[in-house]
Amino acid sequence: MAKREIDVMALQLPIFHQWDKQWFVLTAGDFAAKTYNAMTVSWGSLGIMWGRPFVQVVVRPTRFTFGFMEQFDTFTLSAFPEPYRGALNLLGSKSGRDGDKIAAARLTSIASQKVAAPSFAEAVLTIECRKIYWDDFHPPQFLDPGIDKNYPQRDYHRIYFGQIVCLLGEEKYISTQE
């Protein structure tokens, strides 16, 4: 099915299901320069901050994608249909340091509409973002001590906020309600 640009206020997405069960692929870098990496993510958020639509993602400094998030100003989040579950598993379990995992996942990188970071031909939804804020998790500020159990190696995530500059998706992601 063809993708088209979607007004951010018309996005229809079961967000909790998407993050927890379907996942996204986070891609950072520059498509034209052929320098980018992708990884599967299942923690994050979407909303409005500072009067702007945004995506919030977290990346551990030990991940290869971290360097791309630091170096480049844009990133994309891509959602895929269920038949691509194996590809997302591969992107989440292998490192781009060890080879071309995007090719191994049999995904087709393509130029995005408004950002340098690539997107994917097979994606059913692509969220193009420009970074607007970052911070690091500070363990003394965890109010629930159980959170720290997610960090046995003390590799605390860096948080990135990206302003949504373009949404592309299939019709099913467009709300018909005003």
Image: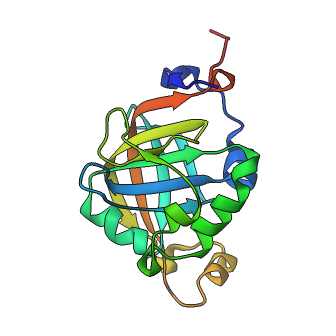
Numbered disc total: 0
The chosen color scheme is rainbow
**Residue depicted at x 41% and y 74%:** 64
**Residue depicted at x 37% and y 64%:** 135
Q: Depth check: give the residue in front, 27 or 46.
A: 27
Quarter of the picture containing the C terminus is: top right
Quarter of the picture containing the N terminus is: top right
User: In the image, 130: left or right of 21?
Assistant: left
**Relative to 138, does residue 152 appear above or below in the rendering?**
below
Q: Residue 11, how many percent across, how many down?
A: 59, 26
The quarter of the picture where residue 111 lies is top left
- The residue positioned farthest toward the bottom in the image shown: 153
Q: Residue 151, how many percent across, how many down?
A: 58, 83
Q: Is residue 56 visible?
A: yes
User: In the image, 37: left or right of 41?
Assistant: left
**Relative to 53, does residue 26 appear above or below in the rendering?**
below
**Residue depicted at x 54% and y 45%:** 78
Q: Residue 139, how many percent across, how many down?
A: 50, 79
The quarter of the picture where residue 12 lies is top right
Q: Is residue 62 visible?
A: no
**Relative to 36, does residue 174 appear above or below in the rendering?**
above
Q: Residue 146, how many percent across, how many down?
A: 69, 78
